[in-house]
Every structure is written in structure tokens, then in C-alpha cells.
Image: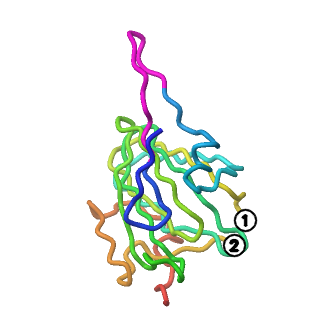
Amino acid sequence: MIFRQTKLAGAYLIDVEAMNDERGFFARSWCRDEFEEHGLNSNLVQCNISYNSSKGTLRGMHFQLPPHEEAKLVRCIRGAIYDVIVDLRPASPTYCQWQGVELNESNRSALYIPEGFAHGFLTLTDDAEVFYQMSSVFVPGSAAGIRWDDPTFAIHWPEQPQCLSDKDQTYPDFVK
């Protein structure tokens, strides 16, 4: 695996190193030891799949409140998404900064998101499927979010979202 630090402290884009032959290829998508060597949380305890039937679906921006913060490893296994993270850690040098990356079935990249980040994505294709691994089980009472269009962050989405949940549309403004 190839670990590339993003512009946000502690967040990594992880690419597979494919071993090709006449059958196709083989690659590791997860290795506890390599994650630990990079100082990343390797205690992934829950996996989820998000299927999105329509291009323009936005999910986010979500996070869990303390003490249930979660690191995430996110990969788009079908179609394409624009994946966005926002650093909400007050002590971080990249506090309140955001970054977006395209994850798709062709690049096979994954985004490692540390605890203390908000996360969301916009589908760039119909029938987009996203696979998540998390370091903490979901605790409904700790679920929180920030608005996808909060002016504090001024996230530049590649397209105007066409489908959002009521909950994702009504998160309050972020207060520093």
C-alpha cells in the first residue's frame, strides 16, 4: 500500500500496489502493521456499506461526539464519489480546513480519516457504492454533523447536490 499524507494533519490517501499478471491483479487493501507504522488507528471494529442510486446524492457532513469519535477508512467500490473531510480538532494545525478527493472504482484509493473530522461525500455517478471501516461502533446519541454548505468552511463541491436527507439539510451553523 502507498500512504500519501493529505494537506490535513493525520489524514491519508491510501493507494493499492497492484501485482499484475495475466489473470488481473492482486493487492492488499488493509494491513494493521502498515497502518500502525504510519501512526494510524488500526483498531477497525465496524464495516458499513452505503449504496446510492442517483448521481448528485450528498451524505454528510457527519461525525461522532466524544467519547465515541471514530477514525474511518473509506473506499468507493462502485461508481465514483467526491469525498470531503473537515478537521474539527481545535488543537490541530489544520483546524476548520477541508479537503476533497475523488474516490472511484478505477483508482481504488481509500481515504483514512482520523478521529475528530467531519466526513461526507457527493456521488458523481448513479449506483455509487461506498465501503467504510470504522474504529468505533455507531452510537446514535453521539451522532452529529455540520452543514454541507456551512460558510465557515466554504467547501467547493464539484456539482450542486440533488438529493439530501432532511437531517443533512438542517444541521446548524458551526461555531468555533
Range drawn in magenta: 14-26
Dominant secondary-structure state across the stretch colored magenta = strand
Q: Nearer the viewer, residue 140 or 63?
A: 63
Q: Secondary structure at mark 1?
A: loop
Magenta stretch containing residue 21, yes or no?
yes
Instruction: Give the residue type that dot 1 points to.
Output: Val
Q: Secondary structure at mark 2?
A: helix
Image mark count = 2
Magenta stretch containing residue 146, yes or no?
no
Residue marked by disc 1: 139
Q: Report if the CB atoms under discs 2 and 1 are less than 8 Å apart.
A: yes
For residue 118, above or below residue 106: below
Task: Estimate how packed mark 1 is, as few (under 14), some (14 to 19) or many (20 or more) residues with alpha carbons within 10 Å.
Answer: few
Q: Residue at x 46, y 46 (%)?
A: 110
Instruction: Give the residue type that dot 2 points to.
Output: Ser
Q: Residue at x 39, y 19 (%)?
A: 20
State the scheme by which the image is colored.
rainbow
Query: Residue 44's spot in the image, x, y percent?
Result: 67, 50
For marks 2 and 1, give the CA distance: 5 Å
Query: Residue 40's spot in the image, x, y percent?
Result: 59, 55
Q: From the viewer's perspective, tell me whether residue 39 is left or right of residue 151.
A: right
Name of the residue lying farthest toward the bottom: 176
Rendered image: mark on residue 142: 2
Task: Estimate how packed mark 2 is, as few (under 14), some (14 to 19) or many (20 or more) residues with alpha carbons within 10 Å.
Answer: few
Task: Residue 128: tell me if it is visible.
Answer: no
Task: Residue 10: tell me if it is visible.
Answer: yes
Query: Residue 69's spot in the image, x, y percent?
Result: 65, 68
Name of the residue lying farthest toward the front: 37
